[in-house]
Amino acid sequence: MTCIEAHGLRKAFGTTMALDGIDLRVEEGRILGLIGPNGAGKTTALNAILGLTSYRGELLVLGRDPSNERDHLMRDVCCITDVAVLPRWARVSQLLDYVSGVHPRFDRSKAEGFLAKTTIRRTSSVRELSKGMVTQLHLALIMAIDAKLLVLDEPTLGLDILYRKQFYDSLLKDYFDHKRTIVVATHQVEEVQNVLTDIMFIDRGRIVFDCSMEELESRYLEVLVNPEKIAAARALQPIHERPMFGRSILLFDGVDRQQLAELGDVRTPSIADLFVAVMGYQTGQARGTAR
Amino acid sequence: MNPESSADAAIPATRRLYWAVRRELWENRSIYLAPLAVAALILVGFLISTISLPGKIRAASALSPMQQHSLIVEPYLIAAGLMMLTTLAVGVFYSLDALYGERRDRSILFWKSLPVSDLTTVLSKAITPVVILPLVTFAITAMVQWIMLLVSSLVLLGNGVSAAPIWTHASLFEKWLMLLYHFLTIHGLWYAPIYGWLLLVSAWARRAPFLWAGLPPLGGRGREDCVQHLAFRHDGGYAHDWWRGRRRGVHDGLYFDGSADALQSGRVPDESRSVDRPGSRGGIPRRGGPAAPLSRPYLSRIVLFRRDRSASTEWVISPQTVWSSFHVADEPTSYRPEIRAAGRRLSPVRNRQDVDSREKCFVTYRFPRQSRSRQ
């Protein structure tokens, strides 16, 4: 079943196109990483999916139109759009009361179970909690919702490295069950590398790259080349090249592994390297081949 | 659509509204704390004044029943008047912040992530000043008056003076009926258009709703209606009638025609003259009449603003976050956040020391006017 389907999604802020005609299709049970620099349009895209902003174009989320049916949609969708959005005046117990009061799919005992593993007291107000604790609290509330789609927008922004690791671990362990769909937007590429099933690079309101992790592993290869073989390597048309300790790392798209093994050590590129290559930021020999 | 999702849509709309209103009471504790604080002040003032009470009551026996009545009733009216002023002030501040505050602190993103519609939220924010606040202050005022009566009775009995005159004249039960009526009509219905206007400003303003609220509602019909409503105050309201009554030498000009009989008759006060107006009945805009600022068109506009206005793009974050998220080494970006601390611009953030010494930083995202071309 298709979870999110968008055609020609557009959104302008003044003269700037935050979304410039996005086509998107996310199937059920995938973990999609929306990756791009600040201001690329990730948040705007997610806000459109969540019914938090107006847009032009066609968009269906779980068969519904988010801009007009946000309240219905939120029964099946849960999200963390920003770590600092829990109301500061609220007490932990009040948030639990409120969510269980309005959400038909919220399992209060589950949320209490998550909180029991933390040091968060029921009587504390959000104001008194540290940033990491606020995230844990928000996560406890969200994870206790039996939703079909989970949307995360920079969920680890402002957290220290320990919490970041924990965050994605508990996401996989406690939440993801192959029926749920997760969309996560981030510009911190390294930390989602092992979590995703699909990646999508977004820049200036356009999707510039879109592929599944399996495809990425079979298509893209990185070779560490010694200077004497560099000319031969360049002849194979790498999509990106960067120097490293006197040698060069070349990134290839769809070149045979055997052929590359003769040039040097072959490995699968990290998403971060691919991102840099595709975005064409670094001064490599070749320009990013956005498709 | 999906049978599963319609089956567990079992939470009725009224229950969601109930929780939305509770949320308002949690968030805005001034709805009951401010009246309680004023009530405490009134009681302290009254306690001090009871020193002279026995002498006053003794002297009052020589006065006419009318003069006796006004002497005894006055403190109860002053207490009620102060509570009403408090109610109005709380209502105004509440309405102005109701829909702006959640955008300013970005908590709107959390509220909107739950299955509560914008209409429910806006209704809860309209019900709070129009229904909840008057009821809460009525209850507190009634309590204050009851305590005042008990305290003065005890003081009088302790001094060997009969408390009978104050029980006769204060006639609290009747007074409470009038008070409830007053709170519901004046503070609920009458002021509703003002609260409506403030809510609209609160839902619409991107900053400084206080400044915008000072403007009369724009657009011919809206403005006319609000002005008309403010004009109600001209011949209505406690203070004015009371004052007019005094000037005429009629000491109890408040609701009654001044004859001593009327006091005991238990007649329901007639305030319809203040509430009915062309285009409105009982303070509520009549169908087909001008669109008052809490009518359906107004409410639906507020709901649309709640739906489409996004959270503030400026928010406060810690220096660690600035460093971990926004320092330039991160990656080039087509739109950079502007980061300020203590009024100084920090972005682009290059040195850790720049941010580390700061207590908090403000981050604003701005879209560039023209997108840069890629080098």
Image (spheres, coloured by chain):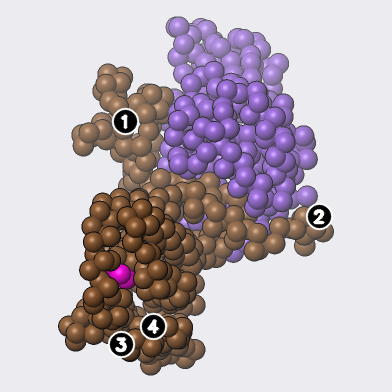
Chain colours: A purple, B brown
- Residue B194, compared with residue B326, is above or below; it is below
Q: Residue furthest left?
A: B247
Q: Hey, what amino acid is under mark 2?
A: Glu
Residue in front for this viewpoint, B249 or A30 = B249
> Residue at the spot x=46%, y=83% of the render?
B266
Q: Hey, what amino acid is under mark 1?
A: Lys
Expressed as whole percent of the image width and height from the top left, the position of residue A262 reads 65, 10
Q: Residues within 10 Å of mark 1 (few under 14, many from 20)?
A: some
Which of the two discs, 2 and 4, sits closer to the camera? Answer: 4
* Disc sitting over residue B360 in the figure: 1
A238 lies left or right of B240: right
Q: Hey, what amino acid is under mark 4?
A: Leu
Q: Earlier in the sequence, mark 2 or mark 1?
A: 2
Expressed as whole percent of the image width and height from the top left, the position of residue B211 reads 24, 61
Q: Which residues are magenta?
A: B70-74
Q: Quadrant of residue A64?
A: bottom right
